[in-house]
Image (cartoon, rainbow, N blue to C red):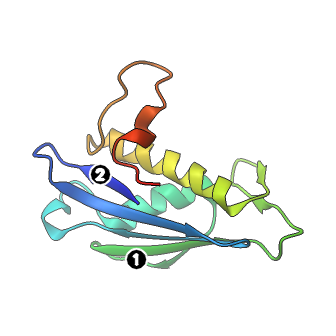
Amino acid sequence: ALSSRADDDKRAGKMFISHGPNTLCLICHVPEEHHTTATAEDWMKAVLSGIGGEMISAGATEAKGEVSRGDASQPFLLPDGSKKDKAETVGFEATKKSVEWLRERQLFPPKEEEGDDDWEAGDVEW
């Protein structure tokens, strides 16, 4: 689960990412009080733009997305042309894209210094 944080340390939303061998499923929730800063639909669109896939349902409070491949013999094809063999790897890319989007809106702690990839230890639960 990926949790964002608003300035007052209340959760501005959550994204859950789950994977099987051929599919990555995403669901995000943004409480109504944070819709001026972020909506679930916008958050999901931003993540899906980096990993491909399709929006299953979209709304201000909840959105669902999915990335699939035909079968295990085919790689996941990302929009940048890269290929990933495991849904877990696509999930990591989704997490990175999500953190970037949240940071742009100041809903996730900023990097301490350039090259700092320690965000996994903060609000990302593995």
Q: Earlier in the sequence, mark 2 or mark 1?
A: 2
Furthest residue to the right? Answer: 73
Left or right side of 94 for 89: right
Residue 18 in picture, x, y percent from top left:
54, 69
Local crowd at mark 1 within 10 Å, few (<14), some, or many (≥20)?
some
| Residue 20 sits in quarter | bottom right
Which residue in the structure is indicated by mark 1?
A: 58
Q: Is mark 1 on a helix, strand or loop?
A: loop
Q: Residue type at mark 2?
A: Ser
Residue 63 in picture, x, y percent from top left:
40, 74
Q: Residue 47 carries which label?
A: none
Q: Residue at x 22, y 54 (%)?
A: 37
Left or right side of 34 for 97: right
Q: Residue type at mark 1?
A: Ala
Which residue in the structure is indicated by mark 2?
A: 4
Q: Which residue is drawn at 37% across and 27% down?
A: 111
In this orientation, which residue lies closer to the viewer: 109 or 39?
109
